[in-house]
Amino acid sequence: MKTTALLRRFAVTFALCAASLASAQTATLKADASALVLSGGSITFTAAANYDGQPSAVGWAIALPSDWTFVSVSGANVPEISPDAGSTGTLEFAYTSAPARRAEFNLVVRYPAGATTAKAVPTVLIRANGKLATLTPAPVVFGR
């Protein structure tokens, strides 16, 4: 009976520790505007991921409307892999040598005239200690 109680206690403690480790990883995608201009224009997004230590790789996929185009990437931690200017659809970025604790970069995209609603849907993958974590930051929605 004591062994079963001890095993249960160990399982609960392990689950709580694993949950707290998982919550230490966060990611956000933010835009510099909350609405689209009817004549078309550009949006700057800031993509940021926080994590413990230094993972072996961090990847971002940002799904955009098919008629939006990638312009540029900038910031203090520019990913080593990024799409070519003019790319459309889902944009993929990757750090093959991820910065410690936080990766952040800016990307500029252009949207066409007449766009009134749109959604940018991000996904982040973090590989650390042989494990892969998938984060799903809140999408950025324009023109609800």
Image (cartoon, rainbow, N blue to C red):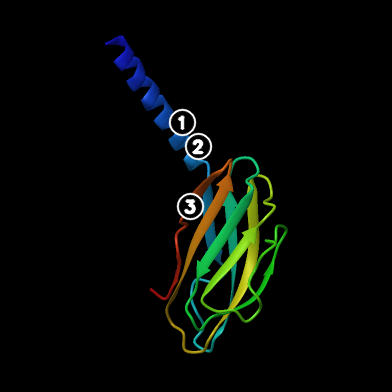
Are there few (<14), some (14-19), or many (20+) residues within 10 Å of tag 1? Answer: few
The answer to whether residue 9 is above or below residue 93 is: above
Q: Please state which amino acid type lies under the numbered disc 3.
A: Thr
Residue 125: x percent and y percent?
A: 53, 54
The answer to which of marks 1 and 3 sits earlier in the sequence is 1
Q: Quadrant of the N terminus?
A: top left
* Rendered residue at 42%/79% (across/down): 117
Q: CA distance from mark 3 to mark 2?
A: 13 Å
Q: Nearer the viewer, residue 81 or 108?
A: 81
Q: Nearer the viewer, residue 93 or 118?
A: 93
From the image, tell me which residue sits under label 3: 134
The answer to whether residue 83 is above or below residue 24 is: below
Q: Are marks 1 and 3 in contact (CB under 8 Å)?
A: no
The answer to whether residue 82 is above or below residue 49 is: below
Are there few (<14), some (14-19), or many (20+) residues within 10 Å of tag 2? Answer: few
Q: Quadrant of the C terminus?
A: bottom left
Q: Please state which amino acid type lies under the numbered disc 2.
A: Leu
For numbered disc 2, what is the local secondary structure?
helix
Residue 127: x percent and y percent?
A: 57, 48
Q: Please state which amino acid type lies under the numbered disc 1.
A: Cys
For numbered disc 1, what is the local secondary structure?
helix
* Rendered residue at 47%/78% (across/down): 65
- Number of the label disc, if any, that sits on residue 17: 1
Q: Are marks 2 and 1 in contact (CB under 8 Å)?
A: yes
